[in-house]
Image (cartoon, rainbow, N blue to C red):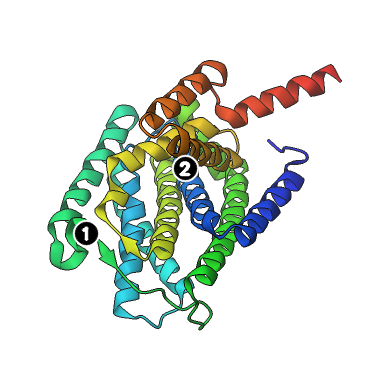
Amino acid sequence: MRLPGFSLLLALAAAGLLILGVALPWLRVPVITFLSYGMAALGLTVLMRAGQVSFGHAMYAAIGGYAVAFAARAHPSVDAAFIVLGGVLASVLAGTLAAAFLSRYRGIFFGMLNLGISMVLFALAGKLYHWTGGTDGLRFERPPILGMALDRGTFELTVMVLALGLAIAVAWLVQRYFASAAGQMMAAIKTNETRLEYIGVSARRSLAEGYVISSALVGLSGSLMALVQGLVTPESGYWIRSGEYVFIAILGGAGHALGAFLGAGVFEVIKLVAAAYFTNAWQILLGSTLIAVIFFAPRGLMGWIQRDRAQRERKE
């Protein structure tokens, strides 16, 4: 569904984020976190279009993050862009292997198998200390960007601009995917998979393709987070992080690619406000928000916006 006026709103939001990043240096990392979480939630949204929810997708963020750390430690002079690309490719490879058998399953089996695999990888990341640094994680020096060694502030600003550009690009590409034949087949898995098979389309193949796209988006998120932090730990692949991605995807809604970023923005604002004013009760605030969304906007915030817009257009 095309949303008139959203291109202008998107441009204004992007400009606003850039201005905030330049004017308020302390906001750069939160903005990168918001954009990264939005990209990860967008990966979950791809699966939700097919009616599937993964409770272990944070493992791809960890895979991407560790790939970035390994590359940066082994080749300190390699440009940050190539390091991030390596993290995404590592996640795609892992996602392709997992999709080969996970695409057979649906519903709770699909979700729990992803969770099981993620917990195995989480345990290995904590135990293989000589390779992963154990629970302390792996630290690495800031890699150069375009051949230039940047100080911390400039580096964070550059990564923020990179993350913003990537977020806009992947949101546009995923929305195009939703409107394509492949995206419509993913949606058909949720509504009537049997009929999809009757017309000669492999539902398993369609889900596998969507799963790989999803793993790439989450891997990109984890790669960017590792890059800006200079650190990756097993916690980046823990089930709680996966739950946060699912929370954001549900909060934003699966009706439009921008829903993931809307949900991520609300999620980050709630966390910042809660940390400042409700230090010991931020989970209650998040939980109350999710309950309110489920009751009053079951299709997420983006679904609520689309419905409200449609109602106003009918009245006109």
Front residue (pair 167, 281): 281
Q: Earlier in the sequence, mark 1 or mark 2?
A: 2
Q: Position of residue 13 (x, y in %)?
A: 68, 48
Mark 2, Cα crowd under 10 Å, few <14 / some 14-19 / many 20+, is many
Front residue (pair 9, 170): 9
Report the residue that reaches farthest toward the right: 316
Residue 174 horizontal side relative to residue 6, left or right: left
Q: Position of residue 31 (x, y in %)?
A: 54, 52
Secondary structure beneath dot 2 equals helix
Number of the label disc, if any, that sits on residue 136: 1
Say which quadrant the N terminus sits in.
top right
Q: Position of residue 240 (x, y in %)?
A: 31, 39
Q: What residue lies at 61% left-to-right and 32% top-to-bottom?
A: 302
The three-letter code of the residue at mark 1 reads Asp
Secondary structure beneath dot 1 equals helix
The quadrant in which residue 180 appears is top right
Q: CA distance from mark 1 to mark 2?
A: 26 Å
Observer able to see residue 103: no
Front residue (pair 171, 266): 266
Front residue (pair 245, 233): 233
Mark 1, Cα crowd under 10 Å, few <14 / some 14-19 / many 20+, is some
As displayed, is residue 14 above or below residue 155? above
Asked if the residue at tag 2 contacts the one at tag 1, i.e. Cβ–Cβ closer than 8 Å, the answer is no
Query: Mark 1 or mark 2, which is nearer to you?
Result: 1
As displayed, is residue 13 above or below residue 82? above
Observer able to see residue 223: yes
The three-letter code of the residue at mark 2 reads Ala
Q: What residue lies at 39% left-to-right and 38% top-to-bottom?
A: 244
Say which quadrant the C terminus sits in.
top right
How many numbered discs sit on the rendered protein? Answer: 2
* Residue bearing the label numbered 2: 41
